[in-house]
Image (cartoon, grey):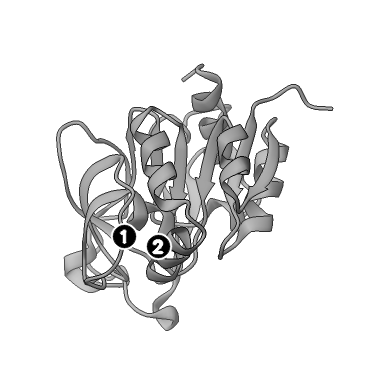
């Protein structure tokens, strides 16, 4: 059995199985988290893609919202992809007025910024701390109803941006937008690395949980 850290995937909605598999391939012990007792046992947590307003409501219903906020404030390593990035931001544009935020990333995100489901796209990205690991090159990113970072404080490290090409989905306003960030023990991407078979982003997070990065 792996001696790696125990990392949970919030299993209220979204692509849970894909994240569990990617974490296990990256040397972690992975488990689904739906209850407070399960949250209390993990060394790190992944917030998967899905629908951010639904996930925030379910966090409240399952009585995980406040405990998770507290654990993040106490330094729990957390990785959010797509909807997870939205939940971790301090402020959301184009979100619902009753949407709950977890905090952890001092930034503003724009929900569904790149467009609707039909505007989903893929792009190879230079990802700081990942693209240069093991000679793997750019990260192939899958964007599905993805957010982008509208603005971020200096405390937020920018790890990846989409290209400056104005023909990127979302038009000229989307060119060069921030799509991957880190602030301390919190990591987030606007895209879905769990869908590509490339586990380098998950390995980065496992290393963060282990305290090696």
Q: Residue at x 47, y 51 (%)?
A: 64
Residue bearing the label numbered 2: 56
- In this orientation, does residue 126 appear? no
Secondary structure under tag 2 reads helix
Image position, residue 198 (x, y; %)? 61, 46
Front one among 199 and 13: 13
First in residue order: circle 2 vs circle 1: 2
Is 147 positioned to the left or the right of 144 in the image? Answer: left
- In this orientation, does residue 34 appear? yes
- Where residue 31 is drawn, which disc sits there? none
Indicate whether 96 appears above or below 165. below
Q: Residue at x 37, y 28 (%)?
A: 74
Image position, residue 36 (x, y; %)? 56, 45
Q: Residue at x 60, y 62 (%)?
A: 15
Front one among 175 and 72: 72
Residue lying furthest bottom: 118
Residue bearing the label numbered 1: 100
Q: Residues within 10 Å of mark 2 (few under 14, many from 20)?
A: many
Secondary structure under tag 1 reads loop
Image position, residue 121 (x, y; %)? 44, 69
Residue 92: quarter of image:
bottom left
Q: Residues within 10 Å of mark 1 (few under 14, many from 20)?
A: many
Front one among 211 and 120: 211
- Quarter occupied by the N terminus: top right
Do the residues bearing badges 2 and 1 touch, measured as CB atoms within 8 Å? Answer: yes
Image position, residue 91 (x, y; %)? 20, 55
Q: CA distance from mark 2 to mark 1?
A: 5 Å
Front one among 139 and 145: 145
Q: Residue at x 47, y 29 (%)?
A: 132
């Amino acid at each position: 059995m792996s001696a790696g850290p125990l990392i949970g995937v919030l299993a209220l909605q979204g692509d849970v199985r894909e994240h569990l598999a990617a974490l296990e391939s990256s040397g972690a012990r992975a488990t689904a988290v739906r209850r407070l007792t399960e949250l209390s046992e993990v060394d790190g947590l992944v917030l998967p893609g899905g629908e951010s307003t639904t996930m925030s409501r379910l966090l409240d219903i399952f009585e995980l919202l406040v405990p998770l906020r507290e654990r993040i404030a106490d330094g729990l390593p957390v990785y959010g992809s797509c909807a997870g990035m939205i939940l971790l931001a301090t402020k959301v544009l184009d979100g619902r007025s009753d949407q709950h935020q977890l905090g952890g990333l001092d930034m503003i995100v724009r929900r569904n910024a790149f467009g609707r489901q039909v505007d989903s796209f893929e792009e190879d990205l230079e990802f700081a701390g990942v693209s240069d690991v093991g000679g793997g090159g750019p990260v192939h990113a899958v964007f599905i109803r993805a957010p982008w970072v509208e603005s971020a404080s200096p405390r937020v490290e920018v790890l990846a941006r989409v290209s400056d090409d104005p023909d990127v989905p979302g038009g000229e306003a989307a060119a060069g937008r921030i799509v991957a960030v880190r602030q301390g023990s919190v990591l987030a991407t606007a895209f879905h690395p769990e869908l590509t078979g490339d586990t380098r982003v998950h390995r980065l997070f496992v290393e963060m949980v282990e305290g090696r990065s």
